[in-house]
Amino acid sequence: MILLDEEIYILSYEKDAAKKLVYAPKRGCVELIDQQLADCLNNRTITAESSLVKELIKAIQKTPQKDLNVMKNGFPELNIDLSNGCNMRCIYCYAGRGEGRIKYQRKEDIDLILDTYFRYLDNLPDHQENATCSIIFTNDAEPTFVPDLLKYTVMTALEKAKRFDIKPIFLLPTNGAFDEELRAFIIKYFNVVSCSFEGLPEVQNQHRPLINNKPSFDRVYDNIKALYQSGIKLIFSVVVTRYNIDYLKETINFFDKNFPGSVVSFGQINLSGRALADKKALGVDQQHFDERFMAALKYGKLTSIKVQGKHGHPNLIPRSHYCSSTAKPNWSVSVAGDMYACMEEKSEAMKIGCFDFEQRELNFDQERIKMLGQKTVDCNEKCCDCFAKYLCAGGCVSKNENQLALCTGIRERCVHFVNHAYEEKKMRVAARRLFNITEDKERR
């Protein structure tokens, strides 16, 4: 509803059924009210001129509106496919990894991609000295499958970036099945490693066998344990199928014991891509996933593990774009030179240009880039009256129709996130009172 030009939503309060939460999505702000006022607001039996309403809106508006275009901030990320090969044969993989002839990115083409990217950043109006950019080695193929090309790209990027006063930040999505020599290189040069790892040994070996169909757990565990002990930032991605849907708490316990303090992201299996017939047997019922994931979110708070999913944010950071792939957009370059806005969705709808390796140039599709930039949650009719619209931002624009079934679970989780944010706010207020800290001092 709109009150005094402020969009608000009334949500349940988990700790007291006699009270409600008022959530202002554009501010990421939440306030507590009693049930009687909530009923009056819902039934429109109280006017905006009421002192109670004015006080409520005044309290909400103490929090400034957030930048809904936050996903546009910063440089576009560069994602480079080094090959189409993989050293695993995951039973649920959405991509064509390693089948048929293996293709590799040529070093001279890597040079062209990096030169073009850094020159592009240097010409952007918000380019500042010592700015940082993110270089990722896309998860459409396993980057550690070609360690020599991976090392070459990192070292070349570091050298070329110096000429433009840019500092590359390297991010590595990986299955973790690399050798010890490459492990030392990753520890030295990479800032963030996102590892696809299921935790529980029996699930890891079932889901993610090596290329020779042997178990992968021991090799991957040894590698990520070394990364963890080095202090590198690790994010664990767990794919949820029928094999582990009922063992999410046990999975959290595994990470809590072996990698305390880590971030673990649970993602529902995506029934698309290669081996679709096999994947159908791996699928999980949507309601079953929503129930188990919500339980995992709550259970994670009893441990050192921070549990995440793909939709919503516990800190109520609102955004109008689902991801930076449409907002900036990012650069994801395939082995063939085709450039996409997203490193996962390499469809014609997400294609924003192409490197002509023969002519040594990049050709942008400016019309496609403009069109993607306009795809915000505010343009999505199904989202207009949803309180969670700026938390999930309508979902991935390329999978929009397939995500309608996800909305119930997303809303349930986002109500929980709003409740979490309110409890965090209460703790901050209590701390300020205890230590006599003003809000101005806290911001400083």
Image (spheres, grey):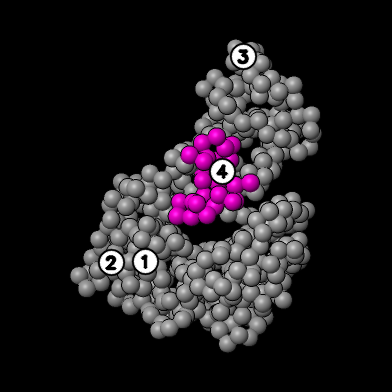
In the figure, is residue 108 to the left or right of 303?
left
Q: Are marks 1 and 3 in contact (CB under 8 Å)?
A: no
Query: Disc 2, disc 1: CB below 8 Å?
Result: yes
Residue found 74% across the figure and 51% down from its top: 298
Do the numbered discs 1 and 4 sit on residues whose CB atoms are within 8 Å?
A: no
Residue 355 - label: 2
Q: Which circle's residue, 2 or 4, is located before the other in the chain? A: 2
Q: Which residue is mark 1?
A: 333
The reply to whether callout 2 and callout 4 are in contact (CB within 8 Å) is no
**Disc 2/disc 4 C-alpha distance (Å):** 35 Å
Crowding at dot 2, Cα within 10 Å, few <14 / some 14-19 / many 20+, comes out as many
Q: Is residue 118 visible from the viewing direction of this image?
A: no
Q: CA distance from mark 2 to mark 1?
A: 8 Å
Can you identify the residue that label 3 sits on?
47
* Badge 1 or badge 3: first in the primary sequence: 3
Classify mark 4: helix, strand or loop.
helix
> In the image, what residue type sits under mark 3?
Thr
Vertical order, 166 against 404 (above or below)? below
Q: CA distance from mark 2 to mark 3?
A: 60 Å
Foreground disc of the pair 1, 3: 3
Q: Quick one: quadrant of the C terminus?
A: top right
Tell me the kind of residue under disc 2.
Answer: Phe
**Which quadrant of the view contains residue 111?**
bottom left
Label 1 and label 3: CA atoms lie apart by 55 Å
Q: Which of 421 and 372 lies nearest the eye of the viewer? A: 372
Numbered disc 3: secondary structure = loop
Relative to 15, say whether 41 is above or below: above
Mark 2 vs mark 1: which is more N-terminal?
1
The boundaries of the magenta stretch are 381-408
Mark 4 lies on residue: 391
- The disc, 2 or 3, on the residue closer to the chain's N-terminal end is 3
Q: How far apart, in angstroms, are the residues tagged by discs 3 and 4? A: 29 Å
